[in-house]
Amino acid sequence: MKWKYLYIWVIGLLAIGCFDDDTTVDTVRISEVAIDTNSLQKEYNRDKNQTLVIDITPYVTQKEKDLPLTFQWDIDYKFYSDSSVLYLDCQELGTFPMRVKVSNEHSSAFYEFKLHVNSPYEEGIAVLSEGSDGTGMLSFMRQMADGTMGNFETRCLTTNNPGEVFPKSPTDMAKRASQLFISYKDDPSIYIVNAKTFELENIVKAPEFSDFLPVAIMIPDNTARTAIALSENGKAYNLASMEGLILTHTTLTSTYSSVKHDYFGGYNPLYYLWDTDLHTICYYNGYTVDNCTKFGAIWNENHEVVAIFENEKGSSFTVLTRKNGEIWKTSLGNYIYLQDPDTYQNVGIDYRDVQRVISNPVLKKEDPKVASPSFQCLFYAQGNKIYCWYYSSTSFPTESWATIDDISNAEITTMAISPDESQVYVGAYRSDESGENGYIYIYDTRTGRLINSYKNVAYKPIKIMYKVK
């Protein structure tokens, strides 16, 4: 009887062993997704308006068999795309955290990185120019992170403002903090663009003033809310830069020459204008104006202004005037007057130097000029020649400092100096050449050596400047 039960028990075990096992334990392995992040960048840099393209598939592996994959790209923690290849038009400046998630039915893998969208106009040389029909153009050459210069990009305003029609006849350009101000005579106005993107932010017009034709802008590169806009007829207007308004100037009420100078290195801005009615310097500190008449005339009515520029850095300025065909140099302290140290009352004129300067060739008001207080000299141009006059000399040079001789019929139209005064920027053009007939030359301030030249990068240069961040 026992053998009977044992036999039944063995038969049962054998029957159980014949059943199929439908479980997946140890027969179907998980296919894990992995991304080779060591072969990918941790940070990407692109300029505004450039495209970032990343194909993630060459860097994705699966541990076992290849299963269907899904993709999710996030920008700044927000979903952007489910494509295997990222195509991103970089339109907004800044730094953005980014991530891609790659998944199959078994697992997911992640790749995190940063995208820096930079301004192609962050810092470098800006050139405002005018074509033969009055059409304006803004060109820009970027200084790269390693200190080298890139290439000039032309038509920066139209590129960054599609559909916007800018006026003709540009006259001046000035930077204020994060904005660039450009004045125009045709359809009299001042256009305000973002200094990093060159995108239009505001347009300032004053149709209520029929004589408002802006030819010069005097504006400090800081957060000041007011500036001076000089009109072609010599009238000074108040430019409310924050509000975007042109107002009658209640302090500067005379008529002024377009020859002017400003110093923004102190607590208050200092503006120096030549009063054409009184034939003297008008000193304006943003609050009050002084026509420099407390101790008699500094110049008599026969003097006409030729140039005003900084002399000793942060300390004095120089005025060149013409009287009966002769050039006179008058250097004054920045605050014009001498003060009694006890009473702080003005007691006289702070003369630094007064002398006649022998002029050959004759220096004219219209000649492009730029001063270097550090090197104590004035650079000026006539035709295709550049001259360098040292303030201590009583005669202007007869030999040119540099000559543009690599192109024929070149005429220098504007000059500027680098912020550290190590380089002189020169803008020239050829009137007998059509199209982009503007040329830019960069010289070493100390030696006069030509550092570089850039051909056909503008129209006739009106204003050149080194735009800082």
Image (cartoon, helix red, strand yellow):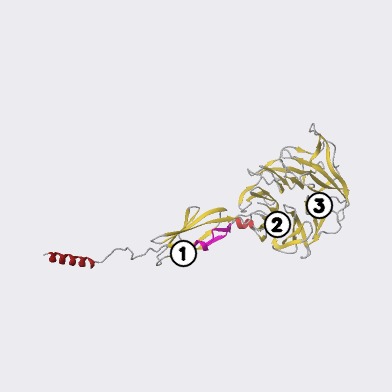
Residue picked out by circle 1: 60
Q: Residue at x 45, y 62 (%)?
A: 34
Instruction: Give the crowd class for mark 3: few <14, some 14-19, many >=20 residues within 10 Å.
Output: many
Q: CB atoms at circles 3 and 2 under 8 Å apart?
A: no
Marks 3 and 2 sit apart, C-alpha to C-alpha, by 26 Å
Residue picked out by circle 3: 377
* Residue 80 seen in render: yes
Query: Of label 1 and label 2, which has the lower sequence position?
Result: 1
Quadrant of the rendering where the N terminus is positioned: bottom left
Q: Position of residue 408 (x, y in %)?
A: 78, 65
Residue placed most toward the observer, 403 or 327: 403
Mark 3 is on which residue type?
Answer: Cys
Compared to residue 342, the image places residue 107 above or below, namely: below
Mark 1 is on which residue type?
Answer: Val
Instruction: Give the crowd class for mark 2: few <14, some 14-19, many >=20 residues within 10 Å.
Output: many
Marks 1 and 3 sit apart, C-alpha to C-alpha, by 64 Å
Number of marks drawn: 3
Q: Which residues make up the magenta segment?
A: 36-53
Residue picked out by circle 2: 129
Query: Residue pushed farthest left?
Result: 1
Element marked by disc 2: strand
Mark 2 is on which residue type?
Answer: Ser
